[in-house]
Amino acid sequence: MDLSYAPAEERFRSQLRAWLQANPPGPEPEALDAWVAYGKDWQRRLYEGGWCGVSWPAEYGGRGASLIEQIIFQEEMARARSPQLINLAGLTMGGPVLIAHGSEAQKRRHLPRILSAEEIWCQGFSEPNAGSDLAALKTRAVLDGDHFIVNGQKVWTSFARYADWCMLLVRTDPTAAKHRGITFLLVDMHSPGITVRPLKQISGDEDFNEVFFADVRVPRDQVVGAVNHGWEIAITTLMHERQTLTFSRQLQSRVALEGLLGLARQWPTAEAPLARRPLARQQLAAAYIDSEAMRYTALRNLTRVLRGGIPGPEGSLEKLFWSEMYQRMLESAVALTGPFGQLVAGSPHAVDDGRWPHLMLYSRGRTIAAGSSEIQRSIIAERVLGLPRA
Ligand SMILES: Cc1cc2nc3c(=O)[nH]c(=O)nc-3n(C[C@H](O)[C@H](O)[C@H](O)COP(=O)(O)OP(=O)(O)OC[C@H]3O[C@@H](n4cnc5c(N)ncnc54)[C@H](O)[C@@H]3O)c2cc1C
């Protein structure tokens, strides 16, 4: 593993760092509506500065950045305390999938608006009875002239309430085997017949949704790839999700760790900070060790990819380790700050205005989203360790 950077990579870093210093993201608002407006503005500013979708080819508005430059990008964004970019589904899944499988018209129509966050995307894959077993999905689309008529329900659709477009998996041939007869559609979320109902999460947020489709008309030219061949497109989407999210996950946990270390140095007072207590020091050191182990695991996988390999099932190690260590770190943050640490935003004595219990509760979903821990362990057992199927 070579951890040094080439001069061109160092130049990339210093240009980006200078831009971020001149254009800081600013503090994140707590309330979701305000956060969405802030997130759109932040992503638009990055786009206008030429710093959005860095890995995309230049002809589609990106910079054609190498994998190393993508890591530098995430490191510098973490350093500047950038939040997750709002159009995450569009940037990490929708855009890359259109670049790989979309028609020229689809690329021209969608890619610039995904980058600028002018249009927000969501991922309509999971259903009440199709999550880990995604191929069991039942939402139906029937061709009627030059339109599909869509009926059914999706669930856990992040940001559907704010989304303009949805990557929708539908069943177009119910007689075919489970993984066949599925089609990947792009659906305008403002179409008549779509109802979005927010779901309240344990953290109090409402960024999850149920989405109902009642006779929604979707033009036939909104199919990505071929009719009844959506499963292959869905797999590409999930591979992009897993691969590109690795470094943005690190960004998120690194920003939280830096915040926790800063808090421990000053709280409850600068004279008697938490960071002097032996138990706190051990937990903070453990969180730091976890974070470094995650970083080197990700770099080891990256080295494999750079040497000509393809992202393999080892990606499950990162997803599993990251989601569990992130939860451990946030549980430590709340435990270390005692009863004050449990107070939520708006309480007069809340630590950091309730940031830690909010993050801790939100992190519960991390061991479920993008494949639950049980599914990741099965992949590691069967495909990395070569153990027999359970
Ligand atoms: C934060 C978050 C954001 C999400 N965003 C989106 C989104 O934007 N779009 C979208 O489509 N979906 C989204 N999801 C849904 C997510 O993809 C599903 O929750 C996930 O795939 C699990 O499916 P499920 O909830 O139906 O649980 P199930 O699949 O029903 O699983 C229930 C439990 O059984 C276990 N289990 C299931 N099958 C097996 C097995 N074969 N072996 C061992 N254990 C098993 C699981 O690990 C889990 O503990 C999101 C979820 C979360 C938490």
Image (tube, rainbow, N blue to C red):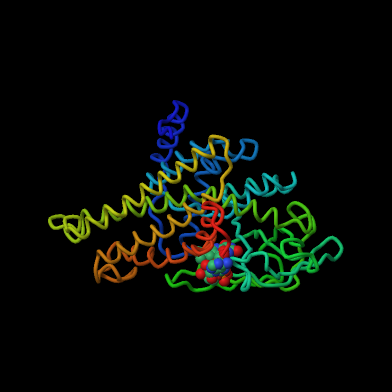
Question: Residue at the spot x=70%, y=53% of the render?
Answer: 232
Q: Residue furthest front?
A: 388
**Front-most of residues 200 and 131:** 131
Q: Can you give x and y, in whole percent of width and height, for residue 101 in the image?
A: 71, 47
Report the quarter where the C terminus lies: bottom right
Report the quarter where the N terminus lies: top left
- Say whether residue 67 is left or right of residue 345: right
Does the rendering let one see residue 209?
no
Q: Quadrant of ligand 1?
A: bottom right
Count how many numbered circles sit on residues in the image: 0
Q: Can you give x and y, in whole percent of width and height, for residue 53 in the image?
A: 56, 43
On screen, residue 33 above or below 296: below
Does the rendering let one see residue 108?
yes
Location of residue 159 (image quadrant): bottom right
Q: Can you give x and y, in whole percent of width and height, for residue 257 in the image?
A: 33, 53
**Front-most of residues 229 and 116:** 229
Location of residue 6 (image quadrant): top left
- Say whether residue 18 is left or right of residue 308: left
Q: Residue furthest top?
A: 7
Q: Residue furthest left?
A: 271
On screen, residue 66 above or below 201: above
Q: Can you give x and y, in whole percent of width and height, for residue 244 in the image?
A: 53, 48
**Front-most of residues 387 and 24:** 387
Question: Residue at the spot x=34%, y=61% of the render?
Answer: 330
- Say whether residue 363 is left or right of residue 144: left
